[in-house]
Image (tube, grey):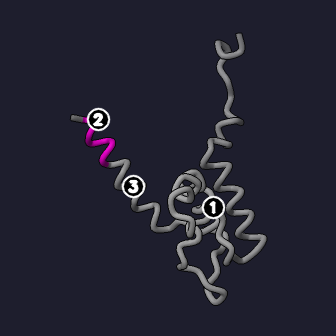
Amino acid sequence: MKKIVWISLLLVILIAFSSCIPGNGSYSPARPAGFFWGIWHGWLAPLSLIIQWFVPKIQLYEPMNTGWWYDFGFYLGILGGFGGLSLSRRKNRTDRM
């Protein structure tokens, strides 16, 4: 029973996140995506990649952005989303052997 609840919760979260995926038409030159949207889109990049196979309108990267700041946020989001911060954690002595 717990497994069904966790799978349902994960599905609801993925559907909620998909409303903020790049390329959905919610950005314009008057209101481009900025730094924080870059972080968010970086976190959602794996999900965007999978959805992009089925919905060609969806993109991995938002073209209507503020430039360098969006790129920087997107890069930070990719690193954080794929566990880039865990690469710098200290290993135990037993891990070294």
Main SS category, magenta section? helix
Q: For the residues carrying marks 2 and 1, which lies nearer the camera in this image? A: 1
Q: Which residue is mark 2?
A: 3
Dividing the picture into quarters, in which one does residue 62 lie?
A: bottom right
Mark 3 is surrounded, within 10 Å at the Cα level, by few (under 14), some (14 to 19) or many (20 or more) other residues, namely few
State if disc 3 and disc 2 touch (CB < 8 Å).
no
Q: Which residue is mark 3?
A: 13
Amino acid type at image mark 3: Ile
Residue 21 percent coordinates (x, y): 53, 65
Residue 83, numbered label: none
Range of the magenta residues?
2-8
Tell me the residue at 63%/75% (across/down): 33
In the foreground, 89 or 32: 32
Q: Is residue 76 above or below residue 96?
A: below
Tell which circle, 1 or 3, labels the residue nearer the N-terminal end. 3
Dividing the picture into quarters, in which one does residue 93 lie?
A: top right
Amino acid type at image mark 1: Leu
